[in-house]
Image: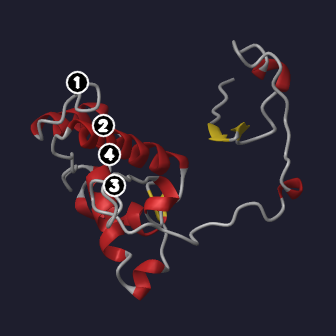
Amino acid sequence: MVYCCFFIHTGHAKLMTTYYPLEKLRKIKGLENAKYVDPYAGGKGNSIRYLSVAPRDDNMKVKGVTNLFCAGEKSGLFVGHTEAIVTGTLAGHNAVRHALGIPYLILPRATVLGDIIAFANEESQSREGKKNRYTFAGSVYFNRMKELGLYTIDKDEIQKRVAQLNLDGVFSKKLM
């Protein structure tokens, strides 16, 4: 049996489900003393979201601040761990570029990440767009991916697209 789980750093490492067997979790190096806790009102009312989305550019830099980058729900009306991870990767990458004084990376709309970042940014300017949530897993953006021909699970096709855009290994290249 395969278990899929996510750990999120919210002060404590948070496992998304308490259904993962604790004895198996404790077999992972560094998690020998893991336990399930919910310090915030027993899980009731602890997810207050989208109250303060930062206006940002498509490079994840917050507008009006010279050295601040944002990601995840802070950077747009994004939903999901994948969206937080990929926007955080770009934000962190561009923070390093900022520190080094080199141009920021803006991913092209021919990539799913570049498109969701730009699309959510554009949509957030309208009243109707602010009502939507943007995720790779469904809703408005999933339909858009399919309509644009961006959606695929073919790894070779994805690698080919990335290579054609000269982005192969862009996040693994040393900047310093």
Query: CA–CA distance between discs 3 and 4?
Result: 25 Å
The amino acid type, in three-letter code, at marker 1 is Met
Residue behind mark 2? 96
Res. 119 image quadrant: bottom left
Residues 147 and 32: in front is 32
Q: CA distance from mark 3 to mark 1?
A: 21 Å
Q: Nearer the viewer, residue 51 or 123?
A: 51
Residue under numbered circle 4: 152
Residue 85 percent location from the top left of the image: 46, 43
Judged by depth in the image, the label closer to the viewer, 2 or 3, is 2
The residue where tag 3 is placed is 60
Q: Please tell me whether mark 2 or mark 4 is closer to you in this view.
A: 2
Q: Indicate the amino acid at tag 4.
A: Thr
Residue 176 is marked as 1
At 44% across and 52% down in the image, what residue appears?
71
Q: Sequence-wise, which precedes: disc 2 or disc 3?
A: 3
Q: Disc 3 residue type?
A: Met
Mark 1–mark 2 CB contact (< 8 Å): yes
Badge 3 crowding class, 10 Å Cα cut-off, few under 14, some 14 to 19, many 20 or more, is many
